Amino acid sequence: MPELPEVETVARDLDVQITGATVTQITHLDWPRLIEGLDPAGFELALTGRRVERVWRRAKWLLVSLDNGNTLAVHLRMSGSLWVPGAEEPRDAHVRLELALADGRTLRFRDVRKFGRMRLLDPAALAALEASFGPEPLAAGFSTAWLQAALKARTTRLKPLLLDQRFVAGLGNIYVDEALWRARLHPERPATSLRPGEATALHEAIQAVLTAAITRRGSTLRDYRTGTGAVGENQHHFQAYGRTDAPCPRCATPIVRSEVAQRGTHHCPTCQVLSPARRSPRKRGNPS
DNA sequence: CATTACCTGCAA
DNA sequence: TTGCAGGTAATG
């Protein structure tokens, strides 16, 4: 579930809340397989006494920098959430892990589907993880010129390409559909077929869609919560994603749901055409 | 590129 | 009961 805007929201919240806090122990663990690379005892030993220096994000990874140079890396996958619960917020059946902090608070990881993962990274492993992703779409490296050139080099269709974290980091099913709708591009358009103006529109759309979603603290479909345990608000602003048969906000044509690259995909069949009308060779006069 | 697997819950 | 869900890794 969580895509870039959701993970970014959690990272910002947790950075404020737990920077400076010290981990004292694991107080709850009911799904040990969420810990990669260490057994639970080793994981607890590695965390105990560590002070949090900051919380940040790369792609869809939530990264907790520790005072010994290592990093606790958390991936929320489909249904994970990580937050600091209120004092008497009860622990429900889907809480998989809880870390106690020295000040009496806890950091709680809840994950209905058990796809989420955590691992401890030393600096080399962190560098390798960071290097495995494409550019951050809200950072300077993601320029219009870069996107234009990168699209030319790929033969894939837009939807699977934008979902590929090695191409651009952080987009997922929701925001790819939203960005393609905004840019008026069909999800199955071959990346190589984009004209310069279309690449520019896609660049603008990706940044606009992600920025707005962060401002609204992410999209809560079901499980996602911010780092303070609140729901996001962006789900009330979808233009295409999840709006099957609802009118396109631009042209009122019903939004179509299809399957592209094994993912549910939503687009407007009027605004987002697969074969855009090429500029007609003649200046005036439409055939009809 | 497609399929399957990993899991659970919910709506049709 | 079946199909579908924000993600990704492994396997033909």
Image (cartoon, coloured by chain):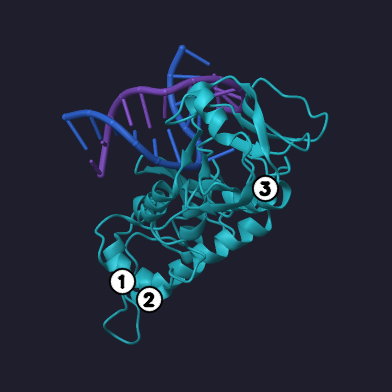
Chain colours: A cyan, B purple, C blue
Q: Is residue A250 visible?
A: no
Mark 2 crowd level (few <14, some 14–19, many ≥20, 10 Å Cα): few
| Mark seen at residue A149 | 1
> Mark 3 or mark 1: which comes first in sequence?
3
From the viewer's perspective, is residue B3 above or below residue A233? above
In the image, A279 versus A188, the foreground residue is: A188
Say which residue label 3 marks: A14
Q: Nearer the viewer, residue A9 or A27?
A: A27
Where is residue A73? Give x, y as percent: 51, 42
Mark 2 secondary-structure assignment: helix
Residue A55 against residue A182 in the figure, above or below: above
Q: Secondary structure at mark 3?
A: helix
Are the residues under marks 2 and 3 on the same chain?
Answer: yes
The type of residue carrying mark 1 is Ala
Amino acid at dot 3: Leu
Q: Which mark is residue A145?
A: 2
Please name whichever residue, A29 or A201, is drawn nearer the observer in this view of the structure. Answer: A29
Number of numbered callouts drawn: 3
> Picture coordinates of residue A112 (x, y %)?
58, 26
